[in-house]
Amino acid sequence: MLHDCDTCDETFDNDEARQSHMRDLNHFINSDTSEKRNTTPHRIAASSSTSSSSSSSDSESSDLKISANMVPDTKNDALENMQLSDLSCREAEEQGVRIPTSALSMRSRLESTKQWAATQNPHNTIPIEEDDEEEEDENENDAVQIQTPKKKKRKRGKRKGKGGDQSLTVKCETCDMRSAYQLYQQHRCAIMASESNASKHDDQSLSPFGIARGAVNEQPLSKEELDKYTKYFHATLYLCLGMIYLKENPLLREPLKVEHFKRRLLGHWGSDAGQSFTYIHFNRLIKKYDLDAIFISGPGHGAPAVLSNSYLEGTYSEVYPDKSEDVEGMRRFFKQFSFPGGIGSHATPETPGSIHEGGELGYSISHAFGTVFDHPNLITVTMVGDGEAETGPLATSWHSTKFLNPITDGAVIPVLHLNGYKINNPTVLSRISHDELECMFKGYGWTPYFVEGSDLETMHQKMAGTLEKCVTEIKAYQKQARDSGKPFRPRWPMIVLRTPKGWTGPRKLDDHYLEGFWRAHQVPITDVLTNPKHMKVLEDWMKSYKPEELFTEDGKLQPELKELAPTGMSRMSANPVANGGILRRKLKIPDFRDYAYDMTKAGAENGPSMELFAKFLRDIMAQNMEHFRVFGPDETESNKLGKIYEAGKKVWMADNFEEDADGGNLAFAGRVMEILSEHTCEGWLEGYILSGRHGLLNSYEPFIHIIDSMVNQHCKWIEKCVDVEWRVPVASLNILLTATVWRQDHNGFTHQDPGFLDVVANKSPEVVRIYLPPDANCLLSVTNHCLRSANYVNVIVADKQEHLQYLNMEDAIVHCTKGVGIWEFASNCENEEPDVVMACCGDVPTQESLAAVALLREHLPQVKIRFVNVVDLFKLIPHYDHPHGLSDDEFKALFTDDKPVIFNFHSYPWLIHRLTYNRKGTKWVVSGYREKGNIDTPLELAIRNGVDRYSLAISALDNMPLLGNKGSSLRELLLDTQIKAKNSAYFEGIDPKETTDWRWPF
């Protein structure tokens, strides 16, 4: 009688053979599953070389790629210790046959066993039989792989005795693997045993190829919808390639020629397919659920995907009428891309729907969260490049969910695009196990949904279902919180999208991998101008999208495809959130004069500048609770801004402890955003203001350098926006720098760096502004001005400690409006020409300069001194280089053109030399921070760098040689006094009382 296998349909002559078969099967099934999951599958397609292809059997054998070092240690451990490598089957993909991961793992084991057996048996007593006949490859001369089924005759082995006749080999019906009959039995059983659990485990594969894998099994698209979305997807990809390559013949109405191409090919193909794929599927949900949504492109140089969708939606032609929806408009659209006088390869400000350029990587998620704060109905879909995901700012920004309130805020759907490669390297997250990646995101507090594969039909269904699940979960969380009035922190959904890099392109070019490899990163085929064969490859590739079916005769998108996109402001490319100036509401700002420091005499007493500023900020916040926030990296209280918590506490959606009620100032619905990441705070603020709101970032001065490049990128964005007519101005980016260099004596050298001003001063004069108010009333006046401004980056430098107060509010307003001026109370030359000009910029430098003037006036009253204070740093630049700059006559009236100017500056002295190098006839001696620091007292730190009162007075004397002996005597006295001050610091650890208690004496 025959004996049947308990798992599959195999039968055996005797029970002993059946039991042996079952033991072998169980041995495989129970082997280490983590080993199976952590292997990297490969799919090798036919070469795109235009040379004639090899025979069918050779082509078939090239479909397999066996990993090296797959030989077991011993014969007995052949099946247990084999290193696995999951292998995809090209023919199976072509025929739409679903190959479970475990089956592919088994295939690798079997192939490895045959290799090992060959080394043990050089005479190869287990013969491998070839098929009787195979059809020729119909595409043997095609340079581009076109996947069509190839039918082959199969020969099955004959069962014989225990395990069958070992001299025969048989071919698997599923994947065509040949093996000895006993191994074939195990292989087939493994396939059948895993089928029931395939949907659960198939997504463990790291391969970007094959049938779609993922946890969401719904198939929401009808056959008709599937066909339309595939065509729409192809239309976007066709446009992407056209932008990279063509300047003529946009619809390939004639064979491609050299003159149709741009002479210099620029652009990036690698992430375009994955981004377009996500974009079009979210469009479906926008229409279905009437969603308010925007799209952020995080991967570098990802503009083609965004531009192509904007063009197909019609938005691009609306804002740029010469890029019309016809053949000529498409030609212009193609030509302008990465072309002089055109647009860049990032999602630049010229791109409708973009608020994030992506030139510098790492900020997509923080920008996205900034857009949804206080936008309760907004969903921001954010593509995150897997290369971008390796940056520090991006890694931290995953924590943004701990600050998202489901009642008052919208939601972000990050889509991590695992296409596997950066410029020339694998990406980290694409090469760790599925379990490790899933656990990582769960640890961050997300619910990750995986969509993985390359088969278009199944990928469309999987992505449609997964995105819809994300949206329905978000709406459910928000409804629960809003209906109950009780905010909570959900595990917000996100997507991990694994597709081949350069998806839908040729798998190989001249036997070198293209699709699914780093070569697809930029221009995928670089030599089309000089290599006719490769030009043909590109032409066949572009024609494979069938543009004649996508566009009408006059170049418009087919009407049935046009219907897939949203209309009006529902289009992500036309949403006003991405042109935030449209939504910007004017801030309600109380009269800053009501917060003035009431002083009686200039320089007579210290005042709490930052506390007064905090009260002003508190009341601004209270009057603008839906569109004003303060951001900072855990320094708001330290910077003496605690008063603002009376209007709005710190947002905190993570857990709370009992102790937090004792001064923690945490709340679900707060207005202060604090996380110890300058990158994340800056990203939040940028996203917040770019989407139509207002805010301020406060930070310690030395550590603002962490976001040098972020601010640089924002400056570039704003500068370009000014030139784009349809961009409406957004609120200015306002940065308050405090805990400044001259009061970081106790923290040491690492905390002493005022160089952020140098970084900002390099940016366009149309965008940046730098203010250094010397006292409280000037700080209030400057802040009022900055918060009312638009399209600027305003940097305000003010120390958080108490300082001398000099100007009443009326004088402060006049002084700040002018930006620079003579302080009459500190000068003694009235309308006469001075002997020396003592000038300063910054709060501590102002105090030390005044003290130096007092020393000179006390000991040399005959010396005529003019005292000049600078609030607006860019007043020093000539007016033809900066709109705030002084004319030459105005500059001369303040600083003269032949008298010494002793300028005491808050930051590095060479910045002043840079700003004034074009001025004529000046004799400037500039003091400032010169990288001299340690654990010091405030005065010792000033002495080290030459900004103290004694050094300044000595410098003035050295530049007035006509004083003769009187000047020399005073110089020696000042040096002696300076040495005593240093000794007080060294031996007592404090500064002399006469300096700490100093007041303006005149």
Image (cartoon, rainbow, N blue to C red):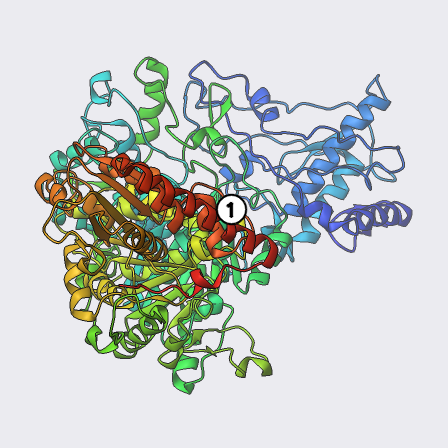
Residue 878 location, x and y as percent? 15, 39
Choose top left, top right, bottom left or bottom right for residue 407: bottom left
Side of 976 where 602 appears, left or right:
left
Callout 1: 10 Å neighbours few (<14), some, many (20+)?
A: many
Choose top left, top right, bottom left or bottom right for residue 591: bottom left
Q: Residue furthest front?
A: 965
Seen from the viewer's position, the closer of residues 645 and 384 is 645
Residue at 67%, 33% (x, y): give it: 177
Side of 494 where 794 appears, left or right:
left
Residue of label 1: 933
Residue 674 location, x and y as percent? 45, 66
Evaluate whether residue 294 shows in this view: yes
Choose top left, top right, bottom left or bottom right for residue 532: top left
Residue at 42%, 63% (x, y): give it: 632
- Residue type at the position of mark 1: Gly
Seen from the viewer's position, the closer of residues 783 and 58 is 783
